[in-house]
Protein backbone atom coordinates (compact mmCIF):
# COMPACT_ATOMS: atom_id res chain seq x y z
CA UNK A 1 0.00 0.00 0.00
CA UNK A 2 1.33 3.40 -0.98
CA UNK A 3 0.52 5.59 2.01
CA UNK A 4 -0.24 9.20 1.18
CA UNK A 5 -0.32 12.01 3.71
CA UNK A 6 -1.87 15.40 3.03
CA UNK A 7 -1.17 18.16 5.54
CA UNK A 8 -4.07 20.12 7.05
CA UNK A 9 -4.09 22.99 9.52
CA UNK A 10 -6.72 24.76 11.59
CA UNK A 11 -6.61 27.42 14.30
CA UNK A 12 -8.76 27.38 17.41
CA UNK A 13 -8.82 29.74 20.37
CA UNK A 14 -8.60 28.68 24.01
CA UNK A 15 -8.71 31.43 26.67
CA UNK A 16 -7.34 33.95 24.15
CA UNK A 17 -4.50 31.58 23.19
CA UNK A 18 -4.17 30.75 19.51
CA UNK A 19 -3.78 26.99 19.17
CA UNK A 20 -2.64 25.58 15.85
CA UNK A 21 -3.91 22.10 15.06
CA UNK A 22 -1.89 20.55 12.25
CA UNK A 23 -0.72 17.39 10.61
CA UNK A 24 0.32 14.89 9.58
CA UNK A 25 3.45 16.68 10.83
CA UNK A 26 6.82 15.92 9.23
CA UNK A 27 9.74 14.73 11.40
CA UNK A 28 11.58 17.98 10.58
CA UNK A 29 8.67 20.16 11.65
CA UNK A 30 8.23 18.19 14.88
CA UNK A 31 11.94 18.39 15.63
CA UNK A 32 11.78 22.19 15.40
CA UNK A 33 9.13 22.39 18.16
CA UNK A 34 9.32 22.06 21.94
CA UNK A 35 7.27 19.50 23.87
CA UNK A 36 5.21 20.36 26.96
CA UNK A 37 6.47 18.81 30.22
CA UNK A 38 2.86 18.10 31.18
CA UNK A 39 2.50 15.53 28.40
CA UNK A 40 3.38 12.61 30.65
CA UNK A 41 0.26 10.39 30.66
CA UNK A 42 1.98 7.51 28.86
CA UNK A 43 5.74 8.04 29.18
CA UNK A 44 8.23 10.62 30.32
CA UNK A 45 7.72 13.68 28.06
CA UNK A 46 11.22 13.32 26.59
CA UNK A 47 10.52 9.69 25.62
CA UNK A 48 7.07 10.48 24.26
CA UNK A 49 8.48 13.28 22.11
CA UNK A 50 11.08 10.84 20.73
CA UNK A 51 8.26 8.35 20.00
CA UNK A 52 6.35 11.05 18.10
CA UNK A 53 9.41 11.79 15.97
CA UNK A 54 9.76 8.09 15.17
CA UNK A 55 6.07 7.64 14.31
CA UNK A 56 6.08 10.68 12.02
CA UNK A 57 8.91 9.05 10.05
CA UNK A 58 7.09 5.73 9.54
CA UNK A 59 5.60 5.18 6.10
CA UNK A 60 2.12 4.75 7.53
CA UNK A 61 2.69 6.90 10.64
CA UNK A 62 0.72 10.04 11.30
CA UNK A 63 1.22 12.58 14.06
CA UNK A 64 -1.23 15.43 14.43
CA UNK A 65 -0.26 18.08 16.97
CA UNK A 66 -1.77 21.02 18.81
CA UNK A 67 0.74 23.79 19.39
CA UNK A 68 0.84 27.12 21.13
CA UNK A 69 3.38 28.94 18.96
CA UNK A 70 6.09 26.30 18.51
CA UNK A 71 5.25 24.53 21.79
CA UNK A 72 3.41 21.19 21.47
CA UNK A 73 0.55 20.95 23.98
CA UNK A 74 -1.32 17.98 22.56
CA UNK A 75 -1.05 15.22 20.01
CA UNK A 76 -2.69 12.19 18.48
CA UNK A 77 -0.76 9.39 16.78
CA UNK A 78 -1.64 6.73 14.20
CA UNK A 79 0.48 3.76 13.18
CA UNK A 80 0.31 0.03 12.56
CA UNK A 81 -0.70 -2.03 15.60
CA UNK A 82 1.96 -3.48 17.88
CA UNK A 83 3.28 -6.81 16.44
CA UNK A 84 2.60 -8.45 19.81
CA UNK A 85 -1.12 -7.69 19.66
CA UNK A 86 -3.82 -9.54 17.73
CA UNK A 87 -4.60 -6.38 15.74
CA UNK A 88 -1.44 -6.95 13.71
CA UNK A 89 -2.46 -10.49 12.67
CA UNK A 90 -1.93 -10.99 8.92
CA UNK A 91 -0.39 -7.50 8.79
CA UNK A 92 -3.44 -6.00 7.16
CA UNK A 93 -2.03 -2.98 5.29
CA UNK A 94 -5.28 -1.05 5.74
CA UNK A 95 -5.56 -1.53 9.52
CA UNK A 96 -4.15 1.41 11.48
CA UNK A 97 -4.34 2.10 15.20
CA UNK A 98 -4.88 5.39 16.94
CA UNK A 99 -1.97 4.93 19.33
CA UNK A 100 -2.46 7.74 21.81
CA UNK A 101 -4.19 11.05 22.28
CA UNK A 102 -3.10 13.42 25.00
CA UNK A 103 -3.61 17.05 25.90
CA UNK A 104 -1.50 18.88 28.51
CA UNK A 105 -3.47 19.51 31.70
CA UNK A 106 -3.69 23.32 31.34
CA UNK A 107 -5.16 22.96 27.85
CA UNK A 108 -7.86 20.36 28.53
CA UNK A 109 -11.65 20.60 28.17
CA UNK A 110 -11.33 23.24 25.46
CA UNK A 111 -12.12 21.02 22.51
CA UNK A 112 -8.49 20.43 21.45
CA UNK A 113 -8.65 16.61 21.50
CA UNK A 114 -11.84 16.65 19.49
CA UNK A 115 -10.36 19.01 16.92
CA UNK A 116 -7.13 16.95 16.68
CA UNK A 117 -9.03 13.78 15.89
CA UNK A 118 -11.45 15.51 13.53
CA UNK A 119 -8.60 17.19 11.63
CA UNK A 120 -6.87 13.79 11.30
CA UNK A 121 -9.86 12.64 9.24
CA UNK A 122 -9.78 15.59 6.82
CA UNK A 123 -7.11 13.84 4.74
CA UNK A 124 -9.23 11.84 2.30
CA UNK A 125 -6.59 9.07 2.26
CA UNK A 126 -7.80 7.92 5.69
CA UNK A 127 -10.90 6.59 3.90
CA UNK A 128 -8.65 3.69 2.81
CA UNK A 129 -8.11 2.55 6.41
CA UNK A 130 -9.93 0.84 9.22
CA UNK A 131 -8.58 2.79 12.19
CA UNK A 132 -8.97 1.12 15.56
CA UNK A 133 -8.59 2.51 19.03
CA UNK A 134 -8.28 0.24 22.04
CA UNK A 135 -9.45 2.07 25.12
CA UNK A 136 -8.04 0.59 28.35
CA UNK A 137 -9.05 2.27 31.59
CA UNK A 138 -5.52 1.87 32.99
CA UNK A 139 -4.32 4.48 30.47
CA UNK A 140 -6.84 7.08 31.57
CA UNK A 141 -6.17 10.11 33.77
CA UNK A 142 -8.88 9.39 36.34
CA UNK A 143 -7.07 11.41 39.00
CA UNK A 144 -7.00 14.79 37.25
CA UNK A 145 -10.38 14.52 35.56
CA UNK A 146 -12.03 13.25 38.77
CA UNK A 147 -14.21 11.01 36.60
CA UNK A 148 -15.00 7.39 37.39
CA UNK A 149 -14.15 4.73 34.82
CA UNK A 150 -17.64 4.70 33.29
CA UNK A 151 -17.79 8.49 32.98
CA UNK A 152 -14.34 8.40 31.35
CA UNK A 153 -15.48 5.60 29.03
CA UNK A 154 -18.42 7.81 28.03
CA UNK A 155 -16.04 10.76 27.42
CA UNK A 156 -13.81 8.61 25.18
CA UNK A 157 -16.76 7.25 23.21
CA UNK A 158 -18.13 10.78 22.62
CA UNK A 159 -14.68 12.06 21.69
CA UNK A 160 -14.00 9.28 19.17
CA UNK A 161 -17.57 9.27 17.81
CA UNK A 162 -17.11 12.95 16.89
CA UNK A 163 -14.69 11.75 14.18
CA UNK A 164 -16.68 8.74 12.98
CA UNK A 165 -15.49 6.00 15.34
CA UNK A 166 -18.02 3.39 16.49
CA UNK A 167 -17.93 0.81 19.26
CA UNK A 168 -17.12 -2.71 18.00
CA UNK A 169 -17.46 -5.96 19.90
CA UNK A 170 -14.47 -8.27 20.31
CA UNK A 171 -13.40 -11.27 22.35
CA UNK A 172 -9.92 -9.79 22.87
CA UNK A 173 -8.95 -10.71 26.47
CA UNK A 174 -7.54 -7.28 27.30
CA UNK A 175 -10.68 -5.48 26.14
CA UNK A 176 -12.86 -8.07 27.89
CA UNK A 177 -10.80 -7.74 31.09
CA UNK A 178 -12.93 -4.80 32.30
CA UNK A 179 -16.36 -3.52 31.22
CA UNK A 180 -14.99 0.02 30.85
CA UNK A 181 -12.45 -1.11 28.24
CA UNK A 182 -13.68 -0.52 24.72
CA UNK A 183 -12.72 -1.26 21.13
CA UNK A 184 -13.72 1.43 18.66
CA UNK A 185 -13.04 1.66 14.95
CA UNK A 186 -13.53 4.08 12.12
CA UNK A 187 -14.21 2.27 8.87
CA UNK A 188 -13.08 4.31 5.87
CA UNK A 189 -15.50 4.84 3.00
CA UNK A 190 -13.26 2.87 0.59
CA UNK A 191 -13.09 -0.26 2.79
CA UNK A 192 -14.45 -3.30 0.95
CA UNK A 193 -16.55 -6.14 2.29
CA UNK A 194 -13.68 -8.67 2.24
CA UNK A 195 -11.44 -6.24 4.16
CA UNK A 196 -14.18 -5.84 6.74
CA UNK A 197 -14.46 -9.64 7.01
CA UNK A 198 -10.72 -9.88 7.73
CA UNK A 199 -11.19 -7.35 10.52
CA UNK A 200 -14.14 -9.38 11.88
CA UNK A 201 -11.91 -12.48 12.01
CA UNK A 202 -9.33 -10.61 14.08
CA UNK A 203 -11.97 -9.25 16.45
CA UNK A 204 -13.27 -12.75 17.16
CA UNK A 205 -10.32 -15.10 17.26
CA UNK A 206 -10.61 -18.72 18.45
CA UNK A 207 -14.38 -18.63 18.32
CA UNK A 208 -16.14 -21.98 18.26
CA UNK A 209 -19.25 -22.40 16.15
CA UNK A 210 -21.84 -25.03 17.08
C1 LIG B 1 -8.96 12.44 27.20
C2 LIG B 1 -8.31 13.76 26.77
C3 LIG B 1 -7.41 13.50 25.56
C4 LIG B 1 -9.43 14.75 26.38
O1 LIG B 1 -8.82 15.93 25.89
P1 LIG B 1 -9.61 17.34 25.90
O2 LIG B 1 -8.92 18.27 24.97
O3 LIG B 1 -9.81 17.76 27.28
O4 LIG B 1 -11.01 16.88 25.27
P2 LIG B 1 -12.07 17.85 24.56
O5 LIG B 1 -12.04 19.18 25.24
O6 LIG B 1 -11.89 17.82 23.10
O7 LIG B 1 -13.43 17.14 24.95
C5 LIG B 1 -13.86 15.92 24.36
C6 LIG B 1 -15.13 15.47 25.08
O8 LIG B 1 -14.80 15.10 26.43
C7 LIG B 1 -15.54 15.89 27.34
N1 LIG B 1 -14.66 16.18 28.49
C8 LIG B 1 -13.39 16.65 28.43
N2 LIG B 1 -12.90 16.77 29.68
C9 LIG B 1 -13.89 16.37 30.51
C10 LIG B 1 -13.99 16.26 31.94
N3 LIG B 1 -12.97 16.58 32.73
N4 LIG B 1 -15.16 15.83 32.45
C11 LIG B 1 -16.20 15.49 31.66
N5 LIG B 1 -16.16 15.56 30.30
C12 LIG B 1 -15.03 16.00 29.75
C13 LIG B 1 -15.93 17.12 26.60
O9 LIG B 1 -17.10 17.70 27.15
C14 LIG B 1 -16.16 16.58 25.21
O10 LIG B 1 -17.43 15.93 25.11
P3 LIG B 1 -18.66 16.65 24.33
O11 LIG B 1 -18.16 16.96 22.96
O12 LIG B 1 -19.74 15.63 24.35
O13 LIG B 1 -18.94 17.88 25.10
C15 LIG B 1 -7.48 14.40 27.93
O14 LIG B 1 -8.25 14.41 29.10
C16 LIG B 1 -6.16 13.66 28.21
O15 LIG B 1 -5.12 13.98 27.64
N6 LIG B 1 -6.19 12.69 29.14
C17 LIG B 1 -4.99 11.89 29.47
C18 LIG B 1 -4.62 10.90 28.40
C19 LIG B 1 -5.79 10.00 28.03
O16 LIG B 1 -6.58 9.56 28.86
N7 LIG B 1 -5.88 9.68 26.72
C20 LIG B 1 -6.93 8.80 26.22
C21 LIG B 1 -6.48 7.38 26.12
S1 LIG B 1 -5.40 7.15 24.71
Image: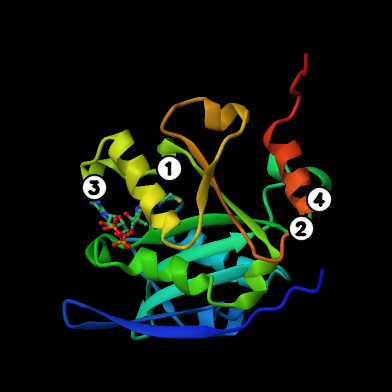
Query: Sequence order check: which comes first, mark 3 or mark 4?
Result: 3
Q: Is mark 2 within 8 Å of ligand 1?
A: no
Q: Is mark 3 within 8 Å of ligand 1?
A: yes
Sequence-wise, the earlier of marks 3 and 2 is: 3
As measured in the structure, the alpha-carbon distance from the residue carrying label 2 to the one carrying label 1 is: 32 Å
One can see residue 54 in this view:
no
Residue designated by label 4? 194
Where residue 123 appears, x then y in whole percent? 59, 77
Q: Is 161 drawn above or below residue 178 in the view shown?
A: below
Dots 3 and 2: beta carbons under 8 Å?
Answer: no
Between the residue at mark 4 and the residue at mark 2, the CA separation in whole angstroms equals: 6 Å
Badge 3 density bin: few <14, some 14–19, many ≥20, Cα 10 Å: few
Which is nearer the eye, 210 or 40?
Answer: 210
State the residue at coordinates (82%, 68%).
Answer: 1
Q: Residue furthest left?
A: 15
Mark sitting on residue 192: 2
Identify the residue under disc 3: 145
Residue with the most extreme top position:
210
Q: Position of residue 15 (x, y in %)?
A: 16, 77
Amino acid sequence: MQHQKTYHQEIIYLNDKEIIIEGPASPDALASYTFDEGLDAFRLPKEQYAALLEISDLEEGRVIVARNGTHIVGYVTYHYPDPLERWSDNNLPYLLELGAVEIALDYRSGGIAKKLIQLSMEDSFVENYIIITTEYYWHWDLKNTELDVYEYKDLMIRLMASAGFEVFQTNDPEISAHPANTLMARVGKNIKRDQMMEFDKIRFKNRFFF
